[in-house]
Image (cartoon, helix red, strand yellow):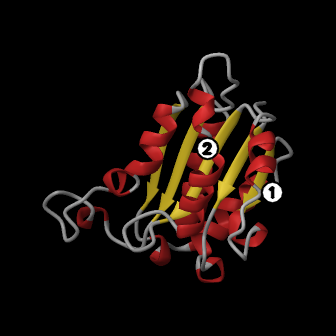
Amino acid sequence: MKKTLAVFAHPYLEHSNSNVELINFYVRHQHFTLRDLYEEYPDFHIAAFRERKRLKNYDRFIFQFPIIWFGMPPLLRLWIDEVFDRNWLNEGEYNPLEGKEVYIVVTTGGKERSFSKEGTYQYTVEELISGLIVSLKVFKANIKDIIIVYEANKLSKKEIILHKQKFAKLLNQ
């Protein structure tokens, strides 16, 4: 099994049944390490050197977060800004993301049709999180899938479990 780091960022986790259930998946499996950025860095002071060192220990990464005001949560954005190192792009430098599998899991309270060119917001979720996608591509990560859970705050327990099972199956391939 691939050693996997799940970078999780949700500023209002106590209000998110879907995310709680999804992150419980990581906790129950020994080859997954869950990093809750809001728990680890409540003061927003990122230990960038320590984070960069930690990234080297993993074969696969998951970035999980909700859409907050049409983008990533602010602490995740800051974490990326401070941890991703442009030196990784220099020849001869070790790039801990290069060639590694990455999954992006996004939850949103909105309907799928709202996140389309014709929808309420006129932007897709992928467009709203393009900063993360471009960053990962620049660092030559292998984005395997972007999983979007729409209307996450309205899902029944059964629907949440189905999403979790589908995700588990994807990661265990």
* Residue 95 horizontal/vertical position (percent): 66, 28
The quadrant in which residue 93 appears is: top right
Q: Amino acid at mark 1?
A: Val
Vertically, is 116 above or below 4? below
* Residue 83 horizontal/vertical position (percent): 66, 48
**Residue at left offset 59%, top offset 77%:** 16
**Residue at left offset 41%, top offset 71%:** 151
The disc placed on residue 84 is: 2
For the residue pair 6 and 30, the one nearer the viewer reads as: 6
The quadrant in which residue 115 appears is: bottom left
Q: Residue furthest right?
A: 30
The disc placed on residue 107 is: none
Using residue 16 as the reference point, say whether residue 71 is left or right of it: left
Secondary structure category for the residue under label 2: loop
The residue that mark 1 highlights is 27
Q: Residue furthest bottom?
A: 15
Using residue 10 as the reference point, say whether residue 45 is left or right of it: right
* Residue 172 horizontal/vertical position (percent): 67, 35
For the residue pair 101 and 166, the one nearer the viewer reads as: 101
Q: Residue furthest top?
A: 92
Which corner quadrant holds the C terminus?
top right
CA–CA distance between discs 1 and 2? 25 Å
Vertically, is 22 above or below 110? above
Secondary structure category for the residue under label 1: helix
Vertically, is 68 above or below 95? below
Using residue 78 as the reference point, say whether residue 38 is left or right of it: right
Mark 1 vs 2, N-terminal side: 1
Vertically, is 1 above or below 85? above
